[in-house]
Image: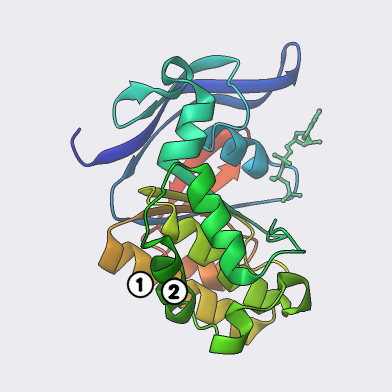
């Protein structure tokens, strides 16, 4: 069990009574692995991700982070300390610079060291931003550059688990490939776990494990 970072145990979810969207899902996510979740529109991928990210609560079953129930430890604590999320729409603060977006997130997550600025700048370079872009308001950056800022923010927040919902959904093919390469590097070098929803099968193929959301269940696909 030591290498398991997140577990779903008999998890079901319904928005309305007696109408399960997810039904009795059992799954373990290991440390240092890159997972993708694919599936038809409306199959429940975002619902699953919302539970994994502690943004919503399952109607039945347990979700464990490093063997502890996230409900019992408190979803807010889980979201603040243990998990970082990357959205399709970047969710940055537009009136702040790329750098400020990261340092303010670090501060909110309780990471308050003198080195915060330095750490954030290093990370922004690592994800491919240029010096002048680091100090620009994010509103003036392209979609791909904004997504790089969102990735750098997730990486600076020290969580071992990164959850991403269609992070390349708004990006062109070339930029998407670059972003996915950064994800692969994060998993390999920083030993983070990434759970990512994507519609793009080609992107899914580069992950360690692909799961298909279908008929309220999540099953591993062995298509590689
Ligand atoms: N707030 C809500 N209240 C009621 N039903 C909802 C709500 N949000 C989603 N649903 C329903 O739950 C099902 C799963 O939705 P979900 O967004 O998880 O699917 P998805 O696989 O992420 O779809 P997509 O690929 O289109 O984003 C859908 O049938 C949807 O209509």
Residue 32: percent from left, percent from top: 29, 55
Q: What residue would you read off at disc 1?
A: 185
Q: Residue at x 69, y 59 (%)?
A: 92
Q: Quadrant of the N terminus?
A: top left
Residue found at the very far left of the displayed protein: 2
Residue found at the very far top of the displayed protein: 17
Disc 1 secondary structure class: helix
Disc 2 secondary structure class: helix
Query: Is 177 positioned to the left or the right of 26 in the image?
Result: right
Q: Foreground residue, 160 or 94?
A: 94
Q: What residue would you read off at disc 2?
A: 182
Q: Quadrant of the C terminus?
A: bottom left
Residue 206 visible, this angle: no
Colour setup of the view: rainbow
- Tell me how far mark 2 sits from mark 1, CA to CA: 5 Å
Count of numbered circles on the image: 2
Q: Name the mark on residue 87.
A: none
Q: Quadrant of residue 22?
A: top right
Q: Residue at x 65, y 61 (%)?
A: 199
Residue 83: percent from left, percent from top: 46, 43
Distance from mark 1 CB to nearest ligand 1 atom below 8 Å: no
Residue found at the very far front of the displayed protein: 114
Query: Is 110 positioned to the left or the right of 191 in the image?
Result: right
Q: Quadrant of residue 50?
A: top right
Label 2–label 1 contact, CB within 8 A = yes
Q: Residue at x 51, y 36 (%)?
A: 79
Residue 145: percent from left, percent from top: 64, 78
Residue 7 visible, this angle: yes
Query: Is 122 positioned to the left or the right of 79 in the image?
Result: left
Residue 222: percent from left, percent from top: 40, 57
Q: Residue at x 51, y 39 (%)?
A: 218
In the rendered view, would you say 178 is above or below 104?
below
């Amino acid at each position: 069990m030591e290498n398991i970072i997140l577990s779903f145990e008999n998890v079901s979810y319904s928005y309305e009574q007696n109408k399960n969207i997810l039904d009795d899902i059992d799954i373990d996510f290991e440390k240092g692995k890159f997972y993708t979740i694919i599936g038809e529109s409306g199959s429940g991928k975002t619902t699953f991700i919302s539970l994994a990210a502690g943004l919503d609560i399952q109607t039945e079953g347990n979700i464990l982070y490093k063997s502890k129930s996230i409900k019992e430890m408190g979803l807010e604590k889980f979201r603040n300390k243990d998990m970082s999320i990357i959205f399709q729409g970047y969710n940055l603060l537009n009136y702040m610079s790329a750098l400020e977006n990261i340092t303010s997130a670090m501060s909110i997550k309780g990471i308050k060291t003198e080195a915060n600025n330095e750490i954030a700048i290093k990370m922004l370079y690592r994800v491919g931003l240029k010096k002048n872009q680091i100090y620009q308001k994010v509103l003036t950056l392209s979609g791909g550059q904004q997504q790089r800022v969102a990735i750098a923010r997730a990486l600076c927040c020290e969580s071992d688990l990164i959850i991403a919902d269609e992070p390349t959904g708004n990006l062109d093919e070339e930029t998407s490939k670059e972003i996915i390469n950064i994800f692969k590097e994060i998993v390999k070098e920083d030993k983070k776990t990434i759970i990512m929803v994507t519609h793009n099968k080609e992107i899914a193929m580069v992950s360690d494990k692909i799961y298909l959301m279908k008929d309220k269940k999540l099953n591993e696909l062995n298509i590689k």
